[in-house]
Amino acid sequence: MKKLFAKAFLGLCALGTSTIAFAQEVEPVIEEGLHNAMKIKFIEGGAGFMSVIAVLLILGLGFCLERVVYMNLAEVNPQKLLKGVEDALEKGDVEGAKTLARNTRGPIASIVYQGLSRIDQGVDIVEKSVISYGSVQSGLLEKNISWIGLFIASAPSVGFMGTVVGMITAFDDIERAGDISPTVVAAGMKICLITTVAGLVVALVLQAFYNYLLAKMEAIINKMEDASITLVDIILKYSYKFTK
């Protein structure tokens, strides 16, 4: 019985080793086949239209990555920043509060610094300054977002243009051949389908990034608004304590 189990175990080990080796051999073949298939479909879709769609994808992803990096760097902990500012103002250390805001990255810290730089002009001026500079920072967050929307709209449009051109090509082939057999119209119809699919895929990829960026931007703007209200309250308490 022990010999039987030992043989079965050795057989399973050999089978597992063979399976792993087969998978390692097949994987490069699959990757190479997929790469070749994509190149073939790119050429079959028409180099002109497919190149435009590829350029839209590259530019769109470039803008998306730039915005993702910018918004991730723009995120800070506003509670920690405002707590440090409040602690400094309670001691009457306005310059210390300014230094803390100046050494912190992001739009919230910039708004806080703008408010603190006008602390001696009164709460009303501080509030107006914070609101105005908040609008500037919101505009910086929205920068290049419209370009991504343009690429999302353009990619399917270019794909549909390829569809129209493919249909025209198919009808030209039918006219030249005097026949409507599938062989005659296959090339033109293939251009229609490939360009349409490529344009839709590019639009879907960029749309996912676009929605993520919008959600991220809205979250940062909400934090900016909350921080602005809290900052005005902190400066108001400082004014009552040190200027009255």
Image (cartoon, helix red, strand yellow):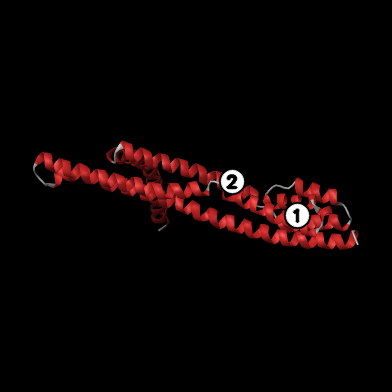
| Residue 14 visible in the displayed image | no
Q: Mark 1: which secondary structure?
A: helix
The amino acid at mark 1 is: Leu
The C terminus is located in which quarter? Answer: bottom right
Q: CB under 8 Å between callouts 1 and 2?
A: no
Q: Which disc number belongs to residue 161?
A: none
> What number of labels is visible?
2
Question: Residue 107, position in %: x, y?
Answer: 67, 50
Determine whether the residue tagged by mark 2 lies in a helix, strand or loop: helix
- Which residue is disc 2 drawn over? 69
Image position, residue 104 (x, y; %): 73, 48
Position in image of residue 105 (x %, y %): 70, 47
Quarter holding residue 225? bottom right
Residue drawn at x 84%, y 63% is 237
Q: Residue furthest left?
A: 178
Position of 51 compared to 146: left or right? left
Left or right of 105: which side holds 167?
A: left
Distance CA(mark 1)–CA(mark 2)? 21 Å
Earlier-in-chain disc, 1 versus 2? 2
- What is the crowding at mark 2: few (fewer than 14 residues within 10 Å), some, or many (at least 20)? few
* Residue under the image location 69 percent in, 61 percent down: 226
Q: Nearer the viewer, residue 156 or 123?
A: 123
Q: Which mark is residue 81?
A: 1
Residue at 87%, 58% in the rendered image:
90
Image position of 58 (left or right of 76): left
